[in-house]
Image (cartoon, coloured by chain):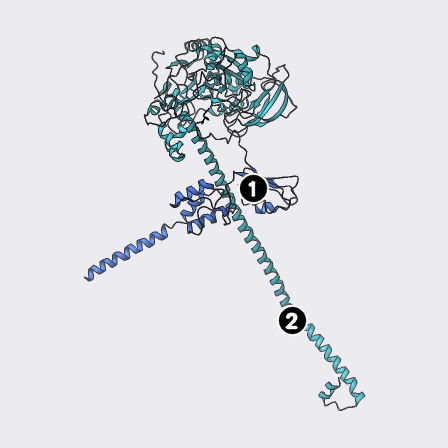
Amino acid sequence: MLSAILVMALGAVILGAALGYASIKFKVEGDPLVEKIDAILPQTQCGQCGFPGCKPYAEAIAKGEADINFCPPGGEEGIRKLADLLGREFKPLSEEHGVEKPKSVAFIDESTCIGCTLCLQACPVDAIVGAAKQMHTIVAARCTGCELCIEPCPVDCIAMMPLPETVENWKWKYPTIPVKAAA
Amino acid sequence: MNALRKLFRFNGGVKPDYHKEPSTTEPIVDFLDVAPMSSEYVIPLHQSIGGVPHPLVKAGEVVKKGQLIGGPDGYVSSAVHASTSGRVKAVEARLMPHTSGLTALCVVIEPDGKDEWIERQPVPWRSMAPDEVRDALRDAGVVGLGGAVFPTYLKVNPGKKGKLDTLVINGAECEPFITCDDMQMRQYGETIVRGAAILRDLTQAGQVLIGIEDNKPEAIAAMRAAIKATGEARIEAVPVPTRYPAGGAKQLIRVLTGIEVPHGKRSTDYGVQCFNTGTAYGVYEALELGQPLISRVVTVAGNVERPRNYVVRFGTPMKDVVALAGPRPDSDRLIMGGPMMGFAMPSDAVPVVKATNCILVGSPALFPPPPPEMPCIRCGECAKVCPTDLQPFEMYWFSRAKMFGKAQEYHLFDCIECGCCAYVCPSRIPLVDYYRFAKSEIWARENEKAAADEARERYEFRMLRDEREKQEKAAKLAAKAAETKARLAAAGAAAPEDEAKKALIAAAQERAQQQQAAAAQPADAAPAGDPAEQQAQR
């Protein structure tokens, strides 16, 4: 009887020690789920979801503090991917957080710009070049289209321009069968 | 010799009607010998795979034939040259010879009619370093003229081993209607052989095999005669069985050498490289004559009275070339390339570019509208004819369902869009349209992903920098506070001095009091023993 209890206790101690060691040795830094969610988010860093960036929103989703349909730039496709990843039902984009728009980039009307640097401070991805009392300009290739620079501009010289379709980024359309009207 | 050469075969392929004879009855002629100059030449800057060349001329400038007007941009890019002399009318967005019907930056040249060359200098390529020769080819704008327009200088590469086993010169020209390579081999075989010899020396190739489909006996004979006439060693013209798409680079390599280049590998890894015959011609002109690529042989065929091959300058409007061939009244469209892989043009005003091997004039009778698409019955015909051994029906299902990841798992990007699957499909499904759709969607997503990754990195760096700045500011403030404190502490240390002063002042006050008191005593003559009274008096 006693030996049986001892054997069981010994087993428990050994396994406990092994588990404890493993939990320290193989500790995962950060939350892999957050990383996965963050990889789906469009990284616009616009804050339309109510969080200060894509990563904080990803963390909130992972904790269950935010729903998956708060991201307008990610759009329907983004919500579907999040629903797939998290095993949840798809739901349409929450209207209070905004609407899905075609991808745009900000454009500074350089004749109106007074060089106040307010937009530079607002840009989450450092896509605006300029200095105090110097004209500013947007590096279009780096602009995520978050619109955060529009609000602080005191002279309203920033406008959003939808990205034009060019021969380089043109996409083949989904094949459709032309429907002829009956004569 | 030829009887000894063992040929291999690729799987699949089809045998469509070739329609090649009509355009081979007349020899190639320079378009400008039989037609007047066009009123303007619209030369798109982007004519090859890779980066868009940047314009080097401005409106109003005078240019000569062969002058560089678009400088190569980035590693994969190729130069663009003026195709005639004249004045630059504008550098502006014009309609491109592209299915999208979109515009892109073009240099519009108004010809002065003199057609005056720039100074041409042969390139001493034999005495130059390989990199310099490659730069010369890039700056001469030589690109693959088989239709893919990949910059040639990037392919002139002996590979990892330092030398190639086999250089394949592609004269198969398997696509129906197109005869530009055929006719060029017949008429300019020696130039092609000399170009192939240059490529052989640049790539250190052990042998050069010129693969020609056996439905072009004249071209085969002409090339054999040209090899003999030039006396070039280790070059051989090899007839290959006529079967579409024998002219695909990987297919021709397979047929001639038996090497099957696997997914994700380059043919140079296996000691083989492949160039089109027209490209070999262009390489000769660029290096031996110092002439940049400003024109090419273009087949005009299809629904025209006089199908023929012309040497056409880049930038010539397609309608000018077609007009000479006499389009029939029921013509309704232009296709750039052949009927299997060609692209419908948005207008007949688009210019001839480096990729224009053929202008195919279509009509409802010649190319009837596709019958309605019917459901896939999984008959497997498409898989039987696929020359890249793919499973077209699977790729079709996944492309149609927009499951792009799955489509990629079935190696969508190994598809060469040859159109064999759509050609045999009994349900008449436009399979290639689905693959093109899926490919462009995947590319767009990859670009978006790359942009998102970069945005994340920049955002994180910005956060890091903000945090660092905050810390630096806090550190600065702390340092300042410490400094003030230190000053105060220093002031504290100076206190004894102050107290000494205070003591001095107090002592002085005391003295003054005593003096006052001494002065008051004799006046009052009061007893000096009562200090309280004294105080009260004061």
Count of labels shown?
Answer: 2
Q: Quadrant of the N terminus of chain B?
A: top left
Label 2 belongs to which residue?
B496
Color used for chain B? Answer: cyan
Category of crowding for the residue at label 2, using alpha-carbon neighbours closer than 10 angstroms: few (below 14), some (14–19), many (at least 20): few
Chain letter, colour blue in render: A
Query: Helix, strand or loop at disc 2?
Result: helix
> Where is residue A164 drawn, in percent x and y?
55, 33
> Where is residue B355 drawn, in percent x and y?
50, 21
Question: What subunit carries mark 2?
Answer: B
Q: Is residue B74 above or below residue B188?
A: below
Q: Answer with the quarter of the image where residue B365 lies.
A: top left
Circle 1: residue type: Ala
The residue that appears at 57% across and 22% down in the rendered structure is B43
Label disc, if present, on residue A127 of the rendered structure: 1
Of B39 and B513, nearer the camera is B39
Category of crowding for the residue at label 1, using alpha-carbon neighbours closer than 10 angstroms: few (below 14), some (14–19), many (at least 20): some
